[in-house]
Image (spheres, rainbow, N blue to C red):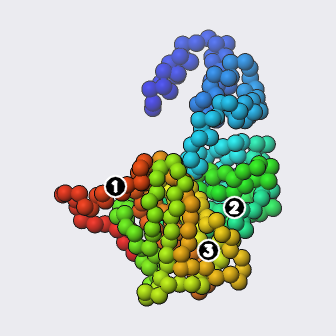
Amino acid sequence: MTRAVAVRLGAFAGALALAFAAAFALGSAVDPVAAADPAPAADSHGGGGDGMSGMPSEEPADAHGAGHSEASAQPPGLAVSQSGYTLVPRNTFFQPGKAQTLAFTIQGPDGKPVTQYTKTHEKDLHLIVVRRDLSGFHHVHPTRSADGVWSIPFTFTAGGQWRIFTDFQPSALGKTLTLGADVNVSGLYIPVPLNEPASVYSVDGYDITLAGKPVAGKESSLTFSITKGGKPITDLQPYLGAFGHLVSLRGGDLAYLHTHPSMEAKAGMKGGPEIEFGTTFPTAGTYSLFLDFQHAGKVRTAEFTVNVTSDGTAIVPPSELPGAGEESPHGH
Ligand SMILES: [Cu+2]
C-alpha cells in the first residue's frame, strides 16, 4: 500500500461521518480532474466545478495568439498537439514482428475527429514511422474511415520506443501541421547507431550521392544524384507529385522537416539523375535525411547523416577523430 493511501485511510478513520462524506466527495471531485488535466492549466480551475468543459474553450482561443509565438517558432513534429489539433493514437502498445493495426485520429478544435482535409502531395495525410534511434524509417499512407479514424496495417520490426509523425492540412486551417507521438513496441531494444556522415548511400544496386553544404538557419541547396551500376538514372518516376520526398529529422529531439523539389512532377514525366532540394535546417546539429524516390515502379529510401553547422563548414566526422571506435552503420 502506498504512503498516500495509508495517510488517507488514517484521516478517514479519525473523521466524523459527515466529515468522512465531505472528504470522500472532495476526493472524488478532485482526483479525476487532476488525472485528466494536463499540468499547465492547473491554475485556471479556481473558479468552479466545470473546469473540464471550460478549459478547452479558453485554451485554444488565446493560447494561439500571442502566447505561443515561442512554440510556433519550434520546428514541426515535436508536439502531439498544435493550433487546436491533436494526434490521438488508438493504441500505443505493440508487439514486434507481426502485422498490427496502427490507428489514430486527428482531433480538431471541436474535440471531434477531423474528416475534412486539404491534400498535400496527393494525400490527405502522410504518416512517418521511425524508431527513436532513427532506424526503421517508413513513410506510408493510411486510409481514413468516414468517422475520421486513420488506420494502416503496420509491422514494427523491433522493440523500442517508436515515433509516429502525421503530416497533414485540415481544411479548416490554412497551413500544414506535423504532429508527433511516441508508441511502445515490446521486446528487446538494441539501439542502432546512425550511419556515419557520408556522401554516398547504396540501396538495391542504386548509388545515391549527396552534394551540398547546409548552413543552419538559411535555405541550403541539397542535390541527390542517382546512379545504378555507374549509369545515371534518367527515368525517375513521379511519386506523390514529386521526383523525391525528403524528410529530415534532427538528432536529439527528432524535429521534423519535410521538403520537396521545387519542380512538380506529373504522371509521364521523367526525372533524374539529379534531384535538388532547398532545405532550411533550423539549427546546427546532426540530421538524418531520408530520401524517397521511385524508379521502375518501386519506391526506395536513401538515408544520410548530415552535420549542419552555423557557417557551412564540415564538422569532422567522429570516425576521423583520434581514438574513434569501429564504424557502425545502420546495417543494411
Ligand atoms: Cu506521404
Judged left or right of residue 164, residue 103 is right
- Quarter of the rendering containing residue 322: bottom left
Rendered-image quadrant of the N terminus:
top left
Q: Is residue 71 above or below residue 213?
A: above
Q: Position of residue 88 (x, y in %)?
A: 65, 50
Mark 3 neighbour density, 10 Å: few (under 14) some (14–19) many (20 or more): many
**Residue found at x 81% / y 61%:** 146
Whether label 3 touches label 1, CB < 8 Å = no
Q: Nearer the viewer, residue 73 or 253?
A: 73
Mark 3 lies within 8 Å of ligand 1 (Cβ measured)? no
Q: Which residue is mark 2?
A: 125
Residue 24 visible, this orientation:
no
Q: Nearer the viewer, residue 106 or 153?
A: 106
Q: Which amino acid, by three-letter code, is at mark 3?
A: Phe
Dot 2 falls on a residue whose secondary structure is strand
Q: Nearer the viewer, residue 187 or 257?
A: 257
Dot 1 falls on a residue whose secondary structure is loop
Rendered-image quadrant of the C terminus:
bottom left
The first of marks 3 and 1 along the sequence is 3
Q: Residue furthest toward the left?
A: 323
Q: Is residue 79 above or below residue 196?
A: above
Residue 214 visible, this orientation:
yes
Mark 1 neighbour density, 10 Å: few (under 14) some (14–19) many (20 or more): few
Q: Which amino acid, by three-letter code, is at mark 1?
A: Ile
Q: Position of residue 142 (x, y in %)?
A: 67, 66
Q: Which residue is mark 3?
A: 243
Q: How far apart are labels 3 and 1 at the CA level?
A: 30 Å
Q: How far apart are labels 2 and 1 at the CA level?
A: 36 Å
Mark number for residue 315? 1
Q: Which amino acid, by three-letter code, is at mark 2?
A: Leu
The first of marks 3 and 2 along the sequence is 2
